[in-house]
Image (cartoon, rainbow, N blue to C red):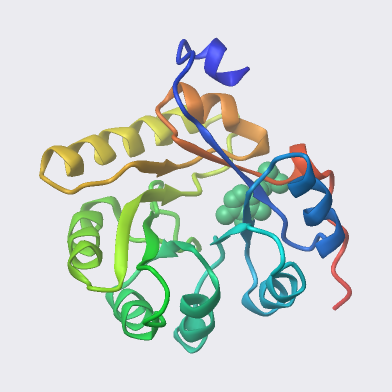
Amino acid sequence: MACRTAGRFGEEVAILAVSKRHPAERIEALHALGQTAFGENYVQEALDKIGRLRHLPIEWHYIGPLQSNKTREAAGHFHWVQTVDRAKIAKRLSDQRPAELPPLNVCVQVNIDREPQKHGVMPEEAEQLARLCAGLPRLRLRGLMCIPRIGSGDHDPSISYRRMADLFRDLKSGGLEMDTLSMGMSADLEAAVTNGSTMVRIGTDLLGPRPVSED
Ligand SMILES: *Cc1c(COP(=O)(O)O)cnc(C)c1O
């Protein structure tokens, strides 16, 4: 629908179902309807679900902040890590990716609106980190990811999305091979698709409100 509105009819926009805090049974049910890619934000919670659903051919994406003491688990159990935001994390993921698995797909997370509390590299630092990822033996650079500033009366997320699309295009024309621009969530997926997203990350609109965590 968003593709049609955006005049991107027929182009591929992948849907990542964001299943944080939802139980494994919900993931299994959505998988049965044809959804194959799922995103999780907390390593421990995700490992539990990945273990329980290992009979299903699910593609698991890590989309939460990643601390260096969790890189081994992330490298061992996910197909993608979308939140690489520093060299140390990239190197550890490459070093710790098990030899029997294909290279880990990664995106560089960009703090596109320069928000102090947000993770991600500043836009001008994205190229350096992307080049590092592209050169690491056990990583496969796939693209860029962002979580823009929440839309409000004085901020239109389309502006952030346009800046991401420009950055993505510039890095590609500078020789970096990338196919994924991961941006857009339930609230603003239309704006993201209009502005060049190739992967939207949808939680609430697919799975309903998240259960309140027990801790
Ligand atoms: C939770 C989350 C989403 C999904 O958010 P919804 O508003 O429920 O669609 C997408 N991306 C990231 C990084 C998230 O943490």
The answer to which of 112 and 169 lies nearer the viewer is 169
Q: Can you tell which quarter of the image residue 96 is in?
A: bottom left
Q: Residue at x 48, y 60 (%)?
A: 118
Q: Position of residue 33 (x, y in %)?
A: 77, 39
Mark count: 0
Residue 89 at x, y percent in the picture: 36, 77
Q: Is residue 79 above or below residue 192?
A: below
Residue 100 screen position, x and y as percent: 41, 79
Quarter the N terminus occupies: top right
Residue drawn at the location 28% of the way across and 51% of the way down = 123
Using the image, determine if residue 159 lies above or below residue 209: above
Q: Is residue 206 left or right of residue 95?
A: right
Taking the view exactly as shown, the residue that stands out farthest to the left is 174
The answer to whether residue 156 is seen in the rendering is no
Image quadrant assignment for residue 137: bottom left
Task: Pinpoint residue 69: horizontal percent, then vertical percent.
Answer: 49, 89
Q: Indicate the quadrant where residue 22 lies.
A: bottom right
Quadrant assignment for the C terminus: bottom right
Q: Residue at x 35, y 68 (%)?
A: 103
Q: Does residue 202 appear in this view?
A: yes
Task: Please indicate whether residue 16 sits to the left or right of residue 146 in the image.
Answer: right
From the viewer's perspective, is residue 143 above or below residue 48? above
Question: Is 16 in front, or is 119?
Answer: 16
170 vs 112, nearest the viewer: 170
Nearer to the camera, 42 or 148 = 42
Residue at 71% x, 40% y is 34
Residue 127 drawn above or below residue 119: above
